[in-house]
Image: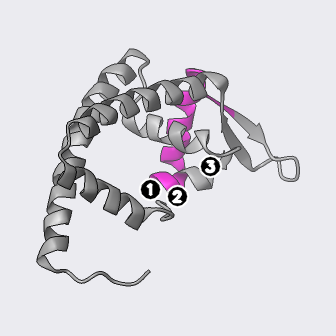
Amino acid sequence: MKPTPQGPSVKADADRLADFVIFTQRSCILNLSAELNKGNVSFPQFFLLAYLSSEEYLTMSDIAKKMGHSTAAATGLVDRLEKLSYVDRLHAVDDRRKIMVRITSKGVELVSKMRKEIAADLAGILADMDEDEAETVEHTKRAIHGRVIS
């Protein structure tokens, strides 16, 4: 990827995008918070479920790495989600000491429901944008397409 000059236009776009991210994050997180409180799921637990929804399984060390936690903290997250029937633990066939965590259908349903609600919130926000704002979002989407968030 080639560096972009930090001219006034780029800075203005970045400032508008930062405002958009802050506003949408606040809007989505408030709705997410109310919904997650019903199921007694914390934000870190939900983010773990979101990771798991796009993977066949994750090992405990994968979870710790993705979440930025120790393995012990990751184990605590998984314990709680397992008690709520959102995840299952499996032993690897080749090494029973290796624990693999996969999302259950109940967990998939929760992530899907939250994703739909976030998408609906974003659709409302995007519908109210003027042409310049929409162009900034589209330009940014193209610029970050294909980047991996680790």
Residue 40 place in picture, x, y as percent: 41, 20
Indicate the amino acid at tag 3: Met
In this view of the protein, which residue sits in the foreground, 73 or 16?
16
The answer for how far apart the CA atoms under marks 3 and 1 are is 12 Å
Sequence order check: which comes first, mark 3 or mark 2? 3
Circles 1 and 2 in contact, beta carbons < 8 Å: yes
* Crowding at mark 1 (Cα within 10 Å: few <14, some 14-19, many 20+): few
Q: Is residue 17 something that shows in the picture?
A: yes
Residue 100 place in picture, x, y as percent: 71, 44
Q: Residue furthest right?
A: 94
On the image, numbered disc 2 is attached to which residue? 65
Q: Vertical placement of 142 versus 2: above or below?
A: above
Q: Vertical placement of 148 versus 60: above or below?
A: below
The answer for how far apart the CA atoms under marks 3 and 2 are is 9 Å
Please report the bounds of the magenta region as a residue range: 64-88
Disc 2 on helix, strand or loop? helix
Residue 51 place in picture, x, y as percent: 54, 45
Residue at 17% x, 46% y is 130
Circles 3 and 2 in contact, beta carbons < 8 Å: no
Instruction: Confirm whether the magenta stretch covers residue 33.
Output: no
Residue 112 place in picture, x, y as percent: 52, 28
On the image, numbered disc 3 is attached to which residue? 60
The answer for how far apart the CA atoms under marks 1 and 2 are is 5 Å
Residue at 58% x, 27% y is 107
Residue at 71% x, 45% y is 99
